[in-house]
Image (cartoon, coloured by chain):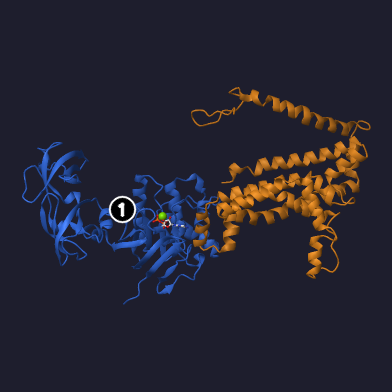
Chain colours: A orange, B blue
Amino acid sequence: MGLSVTADGGRKTPWRDGSFGYVVPALLLIAFFFIVPVIMLLMRSVLEPTPGLQNYRELLGSTTYLRVLLNTFTVAGLVTIVSVLIGFPIAWLLAIMPERWSRLVLAIIVLSMWTNLLARTYAWMVLLQRTGVVNKVLLSLGIIDKPLALVNNLVGVSIGMTYIMLPFIILPLIGVLKSIDPAILRAAALCGANKRQCFTRVLLPLSLPGIASGALMVFVMSLGYYVTPALLGGTSNMMLAELVAQFVQSLVNWGMGGAAALVLLLVTLVLYTIQLKFVNPNRAR
Amino acid sequence: MTQSFLSIRGIRKTYGQVTAVKNVTMDVAEGEFMTFLGPSGSGKSTTLYILAGFQDPTDGDILLKGQSLLSTPSHKRNIGMVFQRYTLFPHLTVGENVAFPLRVRRVGQAEITDRVKKALKLVRLEGLEERKPALMSGGQQQRVALARALVYNPPVLLMDEPLSALDKKLREEIQFEIRRIHQETGVTILYVTHDQEEALRLSDRIAVFSQGEIDQIGTGRELYADPATHFVAGFIGDSNFINAEVLSNTDGNARLLLPGGTVVDGVPMHAGKAGGTSASLLLRPERLSLSSTRIDNGLTVTIKDITFLGNNIEVSTQTGNGEILSVRLPFGHEAISGISRGDQAWLSFEPKSTHAFV
Ligand SMILES: Nc1ncnc2c1ncn2[C@@H]1O[C@H](COP(=O)(O)OP(=O)(O)O)[C@@H](O)[C@H]1O
Ligand SMILES: [Mg+2]
């Protein structure tokens, strides 16, 4: 690779030793096939049907569209919180498990990530529908007396997306948790900290940078997620990505579609900046 | 019998097929500095971890002031510990690290501030409360760890090779500090090391560990002067061993036949083995005399090497059947003047200063 190491151990920045040339084709590719179309879409949001900001006025002024924004943030927030709550203990178990077991479980997690997204989402549809396994089990256990509506609404979307997002929180957290020396937790215990105090005062603060960056990644990915909301969600409760798709595909309204896409992009960029500023892993210790 | 302060009774610990600790029994007096000395893998840390409650023994019991500790979880044992690795909480300042044991005990803020200050003063780090551990040297971090382990006045302090990551000079400096702190606080210390010099410098008594068992417990002097086993003799102080044949052994006084025909009488030997068996004879390098003229009943050797070591001189010699014996002479010793490499010389020793082991 183009990176070289100087005598004092410091890395040369790639453009100084001339290796910048290697990345030019990739940059051109991104510019032509990603940045240019995005800019064109954004241009259309202020040019169509007539030049001006009326698309944005309509998007942010109408309760229907604000409702979509609210849905998007609620679902993304919920998915993030639940993913962290479920993902943390799983990551902890994987981090302290004997290596050969944790490798097996990790392989299963990664394999599930490689399985076709549509297949996995349809599987959830089957599980969650009125006559699905989940409702059947709950009914037969007497916990509920009529089937719960678990698909075609935001509940289904949240469940399906949490499942999809879990690996994105578990995988980085395992690394962070493994880097915590078990002797530090032993020291805490001998200092008099009970299990709960070891967790809240030592383990949690030490893994916070990992949790924060994992959570932000999940949140940002959830904001723009399309497939799962489209399949498991209902037509009445849309999320932002679905709205963009609807504007462009069904309504052929490129102006509104572009405006909705820009809102999504802006939120994502703001969150990304926050991540760079506050959850820089180098500042963690 | 009076009840001892800390009593370790027949501790055994196995991990599947591996026996980490075979049988460890000892009594430690209040305020004593007891060191576990032994090579890596001899079960020192495992014994300490059982005391700390990180591991349960397969067998045996631990009593503190007559009460068994085994059913008490780590966080309620009120024992202090300094680890081999740096275990300060990296997200907390030095002051908060030392305050940690007091915070989890819900001590009031005013008292915490006061006691943290005193603890840091004890380890000579006063005024560094706001520093983050990552910005401190290894030696400083271990001092903070010591302050954190002592701030709640534990009856027992465990230390598992706390200085092994430090360089020699710093190590000696902190050894001195640990001695001072032991004297100032009077805390009972169980200290693990594989470094005999460190053990001799610090301890009231030393327990020599070998393969999960204690070979001998005693003061440094006792271990040096009267080692119970070949292993202890080899581990404490410098040593030479030569093979010998036991001609007779009565009341711990053996008569030995050395290679080359020398016979020595009155060698201390523990186990009462009958004549005819072979034994190994401990000869301390500093207890051997060297002469360039024939000595009756001395060991005939060839000079292999002479090394100047500052205040003394080490002479490496070889016996007729190839065993290497090192001799340490004070600088300026007259015997050395006429001798050079390849010469023949004679070694003699006081039988009482040696030891024979089966
Ligand atoms: N968790 C464990 N699992 C299996 N074997 C262990 C474990 N801990 C220690 N041992 C074994 O027990 C023996 C004693 O280890 P230890 O007490 O750490 O020795 P020391 O501290 O004297 O170097 C070693 O052979 C080690 O391999
Ligand atoms: Mg050890």
Q: Position of residue A184 (x, y in %)?
A: 51, 55
Q: Is residue A51 left or right of residue B131?
A: right
**Residue carrying label 1:** B196
Residue beneath the point at 77% across and 31% down = A34
Foreground pick, B198 / B123: B198
Q: Quadrant of the C terminus of chain B?
A: bottom left
Residue A208, position as x, y percentages in the image? 63, 51
Quarter of the figure that contains the N terminus of chain B: bottom left
Q: Measured along the vertical axis of the image, is residue A284 above or below residue B191?
A: above
Does A203 sit left or right of B57 as displayed? right
Name the secondary structure under disc 1. Answer: helix
Rendering coords of residue B228 (x, y %): 25, 61
Name the amino acid type tagged 1: Gln
- Of residue B283 and residue B148, the one placed in the foreground of this image is B283
Classed neighbour count for the residue bearing mark 1: other residues with Cα under 10 Å, few (<14), some (14–19), many (≥20): many
Question: Is residue B42 at all visible to an observer of this figure?
Answer: yes
Q: Residue at x 37, y 44 (%)?
A: B167
Q: Nearer the viewer, residue A261 or B179?
A: A261
Q: Chain of mark 1?
A: B
